[in-house]
Image (tube, rainbow, N blue to C red):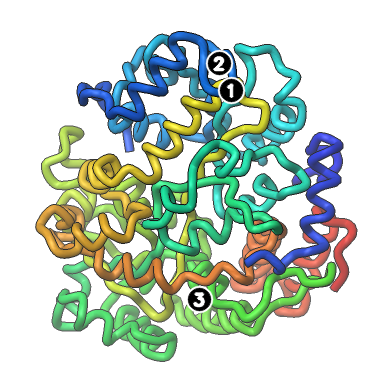
Amino acid sequence: MRKSIKSILGTGLAAAMALTMVACGSQGGNSGSSSTTKPAASSQAASSQAASGSSSSGAEGKVLNVQVWNEEFISRVTDHYPGYTKTDATSGKIGDVDVKFTITPTKDNAYQNNLDKLLPNNAKADANDKVDIFLIEADYALKYVDADANVAMKLSDVGITKDDLSDQYKYTQDIVTDKNGDMRASSWQACSAGLIYNRAIAKAVLGSDDPAEVQKAVSDWSKYNETAAKMKAAGYLMTATANDTFRVYSNNVSAPWVKDNKVTIDANIKKWVDDSKALVDAKETGTGDLWSDEWSAGFKAPGTVFCYFGPAWLINFSMGNAPGSDKGDDGSVAYQGGWGFCEGPQGYYWGGTWVCAANGTDNPTLVKDVIKTMTTDKKVLKEIAMKDSDCVNSKSVLKDLAGSADGNNKVLGGQNPYATLAAGAEKVDMSNTCPYDQGCNEAFQSAMKDYFTGTAASYDAAVQAFQKAVKEKYPSLTF
């Protein structure tokens, strides 16, 4: 279980978090070789200034410290930031500035605990130890972009303008905009998501693996459930676990988990429970946890699971090697180009990584260039999309990819998913996000698993377990 907020945060950040929570609901791959691309003018300027130890705001630091939870951003910088020279898996150089990536895994809240220890006192840290850049995820973004916490700099103070960010999707900006209307992070990703289906199973059961035809069979939850019964009759699971669909329902709620300090279970969350219980009882889906072996078993060819729900990063980062990968044939459906993609019953998003400039950085010029280049430079973003199959945060780049063979995905049998992903990104609504999302979502799914499996005597008993878990995490909340 997580500790209480005050025990894991610095005093200043804890106080700011309390204010944010009262206002809940009010806020609108693998590392490759180093890049040999000639540095862009802006990158070269930043590198030269960092190397000379000066910038418009005075002397800059000799070490750029970046806090991350895995190697994803490291590989993006290694492969795509102009002028970056790789030293080893977690370090490199930009000009004469040493770049140091520190990886703290997310398990047991370790990554956030590390940020909460470092960020409140970052301005007072020794020069070579100062955090310059840190990354955040959607589930806890509001905590770190809070204006009162003030641990992430306003992008405008870094020197990144609204014009610089004008090609991004609105939802990716809304989630990192503070109560004063200031953005405090930027992302290279647009993580709209859909339904990823096994083409061979689609042909066998539905008679076609064409995305338009498959979409007809899953276009709403009623049709989705009818298709699940067909899959069961043919010997397949519809999904590996009921948790596969949770984010689709939770992204389409009518109100946040917490409002005026009170926790409420939204009608769409209750619909997920009812629909999932029926699917579990009919043995049309399982009850395993996401990322478990039970969940990922359907990735192996020929596959016994019809579909998964996810964004582009799930296809590329989790489902197996692409055809022709230098890693070889891993026996996955992905390696056979055996997946297809369609919108599914409801639009939604999952995940995303935002890049923050840490308050107290002594490398403001280089920090600006890294964030601006990695999240707004269209050439770099297209490179990321083509090499890493990421859905990038640029309307014009996605439009270009959607209309070109450059956007075809080998894992998806050559299908181009970018028109669907771009349309989905336009529909994402962040108005019901809340600082309590991660804790409530995790506690609710855990409690409902007991209901689905029969460990909990009833739905009401499972709800009581959920409320107890939430109360332990957030003592001030009511029900």
Labelled disc at residue 60: 2
Amino acid on which disc 2 is placed: Glu
Residue 334 in sight from this viewpoint: yes
Instruction: Quickly name the residue at label 1.
Output: 57
> Is the C-beta separation of discs 1 and 2 under 8 Å?
yes
User: What's the distance in space between the residues labelled 1 and 2, CA to CA?
Assistant: 8 Å
Q: Quadrant of residue 372?
A: top left
Work out which quarter of the rendered image holds the C terminus and state it: bottom right
Mark 3, Cα crowd under 10 Å, few <14 / some 14-19 / many 20+, is some
Residue 88 x %, y %? 37, 15
- Disc 3 marks a residue whose amino acid type is Val
- Give the side of residue 318 with respect to residue 50, left or right: left
Q: Residues within 10 Å of mark 2 (few under 14, many from 20)?
A: many
* Left or right of 410, for residue 167: right
Residue found at x 49% / y 55%: 351
Residue for badge 3 = 280
Viewer-closest of 326 and 149: 149
In which quarter of the view is residue 91 placed? top left
The relative height of residue 161 versus residue 301 in the rendered view (above or below) is above
Question: Is disc 1 surrounded by few (<14), some (14 to 19) or many (20+) residues within 10 Å?
Answer: few
Q: Comparing marks 3 and 1, which lies closer to the viewer? A: 1
Residue 291 is left or right of residue 80, and the answer is: right
Give amino acid for label 1: Ser
N-terminal of the two: label 3 or label 2? Answer: 2
